[in-house]
Amino acid sequence: MQHFPDEWELFSFFSCEPELADSKEEVPFFYNTATYQFSTKEEVVVVSLCPASGDVSMSVKRGETGNLMMELELERVIKMKILRDKKERAEMLLTVDNGDFKQLFYVEMKPYFSLRIKEERTE
């Protein structure tokens, strides 16, 4: 991933500490897989990130029933940008490079989960 938030920015954004796939201290965060799990007012959200490979996966389930609302698995994420990180509202942008075009995933986490997807041609 070319552009990626610092570890402390992710901690603030997700409001929780990640579970690391490799808990050895000598493995840098950038080369590890970090999984964040948290709840909003109505959803349970699980996000896994591996910055070095550009892999991002996300699942959102209804809190009361556990029914799957959305599942997303992305490869070749070149940019992850935090657009808003407030107590009442949090939003990030994930950019995937597909050669002739880029896919933009606007992911709002608070107060409720929402996902908007756009495509742009690459110049």
Image: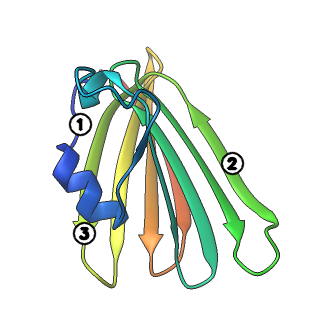
Q: CA distance from mark 1 to mark 2?
A: 22 Å
User: Callout 2: helix, strand or loop?
Assistant: strand
The residue under the point 57% across, 61% down is 45
Residue 119 appears in the picture as rendered: no
Residue 4 is labelled as 1
Q: CA distance from mark 2 to mark 3?
A: 22 Å
Q: How many marks?
A: 3
**Residue type, numbered disc 1:** Phe
**Residue type, numbered disc 2:** Glu
Q: Quadrant of residue 69?
A: bottom right
Q: Residues within 10 Å of mark 2 (few under 14, many from 20)?
A: few
Residue 85 is labelled as 3
User: Callout 3: helix, strand or loop?
Assistant: strand
Residue farthest along the top direction in this orientation: 99
Left or right of residue 47, residue 5 in this image: left
Earlier residue among tags 2 and 3: 2
User: In the displayed structure, would residue 120 be above or below residue 99?
Assistant: below
Residue matched to label 2: 71
